[in-house]
Image (cartoon, rainbow, N blue to C red):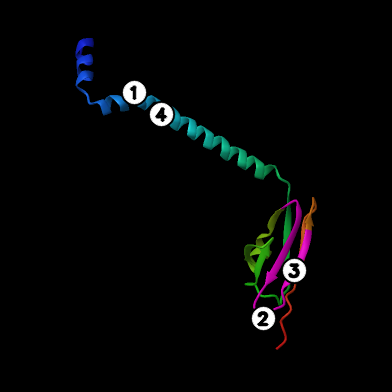
């Protein structure tokens, strides 16, 4: 195909096709830039979470405490006591409120200050008398 034939084909294309053809490199550049920005942001957020010191929290469940009691830390649900006692939790440095609750039992509540040393707590829920 010669140069004249190619230019003749372009003269027969619609204005929309010509506009899209001219726009395509810019759209590709915009898409690549957006993807790069998202990758950089995700790396930055991962480094921020990994860079924060964290302390391990171990909860020991007393035998009479129910496994399905609800564990919350700073008013966020963590899981059932049996699961949390087996797995443990990583806490960012600072002060935290740990609460364990189950219907029919008095709530268990502790304030901890996570520093550098691991934290070990024994959870013993007391039944509410009838």
Q: Picture coordinates of residue 36 (x, y %)? A: 51, 32
Q: CA distance from mark 1 to mark 3?
A: 65 Å
- CB of mark 4 within 8 Å of CB of mark 1? no
- The reply to whether residue 81 is visible in this rendering is no
Residue 61 vs residue 96, the one in the foreground: 96
> Where does the magenta region start and end?
92-112
* Inter-mark Cα distance, 1 to 2: 71 Å
Residues at badges 1 and 2 in contact (C-beta under 8 Å)?
no
**If you read the primary sequence from the N terminus, does the residue marked by circle 1 or circle 3 appear first?**
1
Q: In the image, is residue 75 above or below residue 35?
A: below
Question: Which quarter of the figure has residue 118?
Answer: bottom right
84 vs 41, left or right, is right
Label 3, on which residue? 109
Outermost residue to the front = 15
Report the residue at 72% width, 64% height from top.
98
Q: Quadrant of residue 65?
A: bottom right
12 shown above or below 51: above
Q: Camera-side residue: 90 or 60?
A: 90
Q: Could you tell which of marks 3 and 4 lies nearer the N-terminus? A: 4
Name the residue tied to disc 4: 28
């Amino acid at each position: 195909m010669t140069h004249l034939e190619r230019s003749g084909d372009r003269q027969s294309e619609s204005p929309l096709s010509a506009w899209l053809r001219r726009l395509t490199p810019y759209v590709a550049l915009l898409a690549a830039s957006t993807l790069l920005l998202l990758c950089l942001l995700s790396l930055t957020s991962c480094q921020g979470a990994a860079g924060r010191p964290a302390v391990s929290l171990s909860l020991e469940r007393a035998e009479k405490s129910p496994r399905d009691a609800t564990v919350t830390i700073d008013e966020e649900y963590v899981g059932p006591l049996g699961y949390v006692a087996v797995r443990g939790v990583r806490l960012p440095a600072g002060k935290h409120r740990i609460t364990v609750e189950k219907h029919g039992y008095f709530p268990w509540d502790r304030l901890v200050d996570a520093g550098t040393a691991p934290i070990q707590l024994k959870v013993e829920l007391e039944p509410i008398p009838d």
